[in-house]
Amino acid sequence: MEQDHTPSLGELPAVWRDRAQFLREWGDPNSGRLWCIAAAELDEAMRVLGEESLTLVEAAHVSGFSPDYLGALVRRGEIPNYGRKNAPRVRRADLPIKKPTSTVRPSQQHAKHDAPRGRQTLVSRTWCIKA
């Protein structure tokens, strides 16, 4: 039962059910039953969380998109509106999730620290000075 990667939250119930089956097959039905119960509880908790309706501001914090963009998706019908026309609400499960951008800063080993005062900008992974 080796794992190549850490399972996502959505994958956990299936992983836990596989673990339960493995334990049952190898003579530990009680532990297998407990893993099945845990998987069912997680499935239910994720379902309830997904049904939660959020304001556009709350949804923006969860999704990473702006409230205006989410409002546009609601107006175009790409996300169902669970609120009123002028006070839309969206289900957590319907939200698009923005992929995180890299927060790694470029290496500054190429920065010219002895250059005259100016604005530094990143060009092709090296720093240059704009006068």
Image: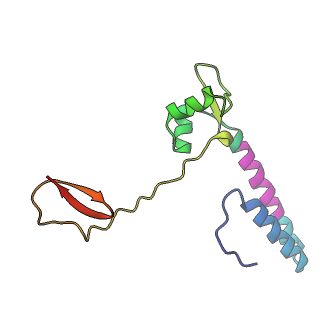
* Left or right of residue 34, residue 62 in this image: left
What segment carries the magenta color? 36-48
Extreme residue toward the left, this view: 116
Front residue of 39 and 28? 39
What secondary structure prevails in the magenta region?
Answer: helix
Q: Residue at x 51, y 44 (%)?
A: 64
Name above or below for residue 71 compared with residue 84: below
* Left or right of residue 73, residue 18 in this image: right
Extreme residue toward the front, this view: 124
Query: Residue 97 at what x, y percent from top left?
Result: 58, 47
Query: Residue 47 at what x, y percent from top left?
Result: 74, 45
* Left or right of residue 8, residue 112 in this image: left
Front residue of 82 and 125? 125
Name above or below for residue 101 compared with residue 52: below
- The question of residue 41 being in magenta is answered with yes
Q: Residue at x 76, y 66 (%)?
A: 15
Name above or below for residue 125 compared with residue 54: below
* Left or right of residue 96, residue 67 in this image: left
Name above or below for residue 34 compared with residue 119: below
Front residue of 131 and 40? 131
Q: Residue at x 67, y 37 (%)?
A: 52
Query: Residue 66 at what x, y percent from top left?
Result: 49, 37
